[in-house]
Image (cartoon, helix red, strand yellow):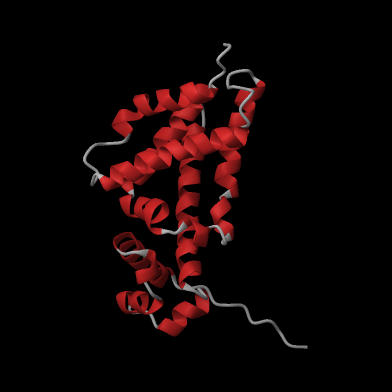
Amino acid sequence: MKKTVSKKMLPPEAKSRLEAAVKELFSRQDFHQVNMRQIAQKTGIGLNTIYMHYESKERLLFSFVDEWIQRLDHRLDEHLQGLEEIKEKIRKIIWVILDFYEKNPDIGTIVIITVPFRTWMTDATFKQKELAGRIITLLEEGRRKGILNARIPANFMFDILFGVIHRIVYIWLYLKKKESMTAKINMYFDVIWRAIENPDR
């Protein structure tokens, strides 16, 4: 009976170089222009070594996208601690996401502009179950308590929320980051809140 040989972990220093190269290349070039050979040359890591850990360009990129969104989710969890009101939690969610992309415009460019959604949808990382689950659970709680519009399903509210946020980030990147997104949080929140609040309250 053959023993299964486990794949060795990529050394942290090499992974850090890969992450930096992925950020730089995919945020400055079209998705289809970037290839594994470029990444190998940029990092000084052998092409075969990269393929041993990531079987394709897509898997390499999406593994880092997954890590970045997990970091965002952890930040959300930290910032929501201690907040009681649904309304303030939703405001904080919007602020944290905008602040994250404001501080990481290269990640924003990759996630919102560079990556073809049809390609990303074929990967398990696209669903982002933890992040989506955390927010949809909060929205469902708001509906149950009569704070949010019970006639709008929580998953549709989630789509409204992220549709507006992604549009804000997209325009901010397109306009070359001329103004702070978080500085306009009250205006953005007011628009989203009016769309999902319970009109009968």
Image quarter where the C terminus lies is top right
Residue closest to the far bottom: 1
Residue closest to the far left: 178
Give the tally of numbered discs. 0
Residue 187: image x %, image y %? 35, 25
**166 up-or-down from 112: above or below:** above
Residue 46: image x %, image y %? 39, 83
Tell me where residue 18 sits by quadrant. bottom left
Residue 129: image x %, image y %? 60, 48
Q: Left of 129 or right of it: where is 39?
A: left
Q: Evaluate whether residue 78 shows in this view.
A: no
Residue closest to the far top: 201
Residue at the spot 40% in from the left edge and 51% down from the top edge: 112
Q: Evaluate whether residue 119 shows in this view.
A: yes
Residue at the spot 36% in from the left edge and 24% down from the top edge: 186
Q: Left of 147 or right of it: where is 170?
A: left
Residue at the spot 57% in from the left edge and 18% down from the top edge: 198
Tell me where residue 148 sits by quadrant. top right
Image quarter where the N terminus lies is bottom right
Q: Left of 25 or right of it: where is 112?
A: right
Residue at the spot 67% in from the left edge and 23% down from the top edge: 144
**7 up-or-down from 62: above or below:** below
Q: Left of 183 or right of it: where is 143?
A: right
Which is more toward the observer, 106 or 14? 106
